[in-house]
């Protein structure tokens, strides 16, 4: 959360005072043609209004009227490879960052590049997903909203993360397999079909779709911007 410091209030008060007092002094001079009057009125006005402005700012800082409290969340994108998880996560991250949310992004490919020995067996995927989920819950505990994008194909590991988090928002990116395969962003579906890679989610490895996700998006039906707007709208209510 961003708070106005006392110094910022003082600097704002000063800068505004200079502009406003010069205006007042100029008006007094225009009406009286007296530089001494203009200087006296300007001087008194500046001193009094500086004090009042500071007091006004500090009083408003104590009032909660018109302030909305935002609770941090773990926004978890799950879905097949190529479904659009990373694309949506990145767009949402940029949008939230631009609105000054305290937000962090975690992506399957990036984590796997850091820990390249992570495999794709059920045990390895579950271990990897639970580890990241635990980290996400710690970030959330400390006020950071986490945007995570992992295939996370098994319900048990997603449910584990849900149990660790205060506000878990499961976003099921339900783009059909045929569309993901058609996109084949990294050429992995082609390799999986040829048998050059095995245990590929959706081809020869399972994907357990969420039963009650907070949000479901099929990216073959919605643009990136619409999807991000949909998520933003939904998370404001959670
Ligand atoms: N066998 C197999 N199955 C699925 N995915 C594979 C596989 N081998 C490599 N890749 C690439 O690894 C990315 C998935 O990593 P994740 O950490 O998100 O997967 S998981 O949650 O542990 O299931 C995934 O990235 P995305 O396409 O962004 O999902 C693939 O590029
Ligand atoms: N509406 C959409 N939303 C998200 N991605 C889309 C959309 N339309 C086309 N795409 C494309 O689909 C691909 C999805 O890839 P990616 O985000 O890496 O998926 P994943 O992280 O699920 O593997 C990207 O090349 C993206 O540009």
Image (cartoon, rainbow, N blue to C red):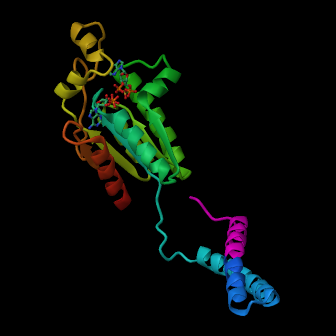
Q: Please tell me whether the stretch drawn in magenta is mainly helix, strand or loop.
A: helix
Q: Is residue 173 located in the magenta-colored stretch of the structure? A: no
Report ligand 2 position as a quadrant.
top left
Residue drawn at x 24%, y 24% is: 183
- The part of the image, by quadrant, that contains residue 21 is bottom right
Q: Is residue 138 above or below residue 195?
A: below
Residue 114 is situated, as x and y percent measured from the top left of the image, at: 53, 23
Residue 5 is situated, as x and y percent measured from the top left of the image, at: 68, 65
Q: Is residue 219 above or below residue 215?
A: above
Residue drawn at x 72%, y 73% is: 18
Q: Is residue 49 above or below residue 10?
A: below
Stretch of the chain drawn in magenta: 1-19
Looking at the image, the residue that sits furthest to the bottom is 32
Q: Quadrant of the N terminus?
A: bottom right
Q: Is residue 126 above or below residue 147?
A: above
Residue drawn at x 33%, y 18% is: 186
Residue 175 showing in the rendered view: yes
């Amino acid at each position: 959360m961003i708070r106005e410091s006392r110094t910022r209030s003082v600097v704002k008060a000063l800068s505004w005072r200079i502009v406003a007092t010069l205006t007042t002094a100029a008006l007094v001079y225009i009406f009286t043609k007296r530089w001494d009057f203009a200087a006296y009125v300007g001087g008194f006005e500046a001193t009094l209004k500086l004090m009042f402005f500071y007091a006004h700012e500090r009083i408003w800082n104590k009032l909660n009227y018109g302030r909305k409290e935002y609770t941090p969340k773990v926004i978890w994108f799950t879905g097949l490879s190529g479904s659009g998880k990373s694309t949506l996560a990145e767009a949402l991250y940029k949008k939230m960052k631009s609105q000054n949310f305290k937000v962090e992004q975690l992506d399957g490919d990036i984590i796997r590049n850091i820990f390249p020995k992570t495999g794709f067996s059920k045990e390895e995927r579950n271990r990897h997903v639970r580890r990241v989920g635990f980290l996400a819950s710690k970030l959330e505990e400390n006020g950071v909203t986490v945007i995570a994008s992992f295939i996370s194909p098994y319900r048990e590991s997603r449910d584990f993360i849900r149990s660790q988090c205060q506000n878990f928002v499961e976003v099921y990116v339900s783009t059909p397999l045929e569309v993901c395969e058609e996109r084949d962003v990294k050429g992995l579906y082609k390799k999986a079909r040829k048998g050059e890679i095995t245990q590929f989610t959706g081809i020869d490895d399972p994907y357990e779709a969420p039963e009650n996700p907070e949000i479901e998006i099929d990216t073959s039906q919605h643009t990136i911007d619409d999807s991000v707007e949909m998520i933003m709208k939904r998370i404001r209510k959670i």
